């Protein structure tokens, strides 16, 4: 499930801040965070803060309204 903002073990992660292109939350409380440069890193989710189903287009991430 793609979300917009989560609270994790590394702090608050939000789409559009610090190069984060999209966040994919798995069912076992882990999230894959995709950056604008193409890197992927995993974090543990403590709480989902914003779940409005907006997914960034990774090809045109700089053109989306965050």
Image: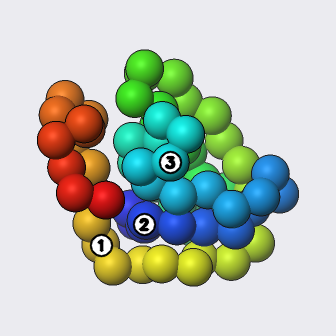
Q: Residue at x 59, y 77 (%)?
A: 48
Which residue, given by chain and number where applicable, does mark 2 sit on? 3
Q: Above or below — where is 43 with respect to 19?
A: below
Q: Residue at x 48, y 35 (%)?
A: 19
User: Is 41 placed above or below 46 here?
Assistant: above
- What residue did someone put label 1 on? 53
Q: In what element is the residue under mark 3?
A: loop
65 on left or right of 14? left
Instruction: Identify the image's colour scheme: rainbow, by chain, secondary structure or one colour.
Output: rainbow
Q: Residues within 10 Å of mark 3 (few under 14, many from 20)?
A: few
Q: Is residue 29 visible?
A: no
Residue 55 located left or right of residue 48: left
Which element type, helix, strand or loop, lies under badge 2?
strand
Image location (x, y in percent) of residue 28: 66, 64
- When the figure is inspected, residue 61 is found, relative to residue 66, above or below; the finding is above
17 and 2: which is toward the camera = 17
Give the mark nearer the N terminus: 1 vs 3.
3
**Closer to the N terminus: mark 1 or mark 2?**
2
Residue at the (16%, 41%) spot, across then down: 63
């Amino acid at each position: 499930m793609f979300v917009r903002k989560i609270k994790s073990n590394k702090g608050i992660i939000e789409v559009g801040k610090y190069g984060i292109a999209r966040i994919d939350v798995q069912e076992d409380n882990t999230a894959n965070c995709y950056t604008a440069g193409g890197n992927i890193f995993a974090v543990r989710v403590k709480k989902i803060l914003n779940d409005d189903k907006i997914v960034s287009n990774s090809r045109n991430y700089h053109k989306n309204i965050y």
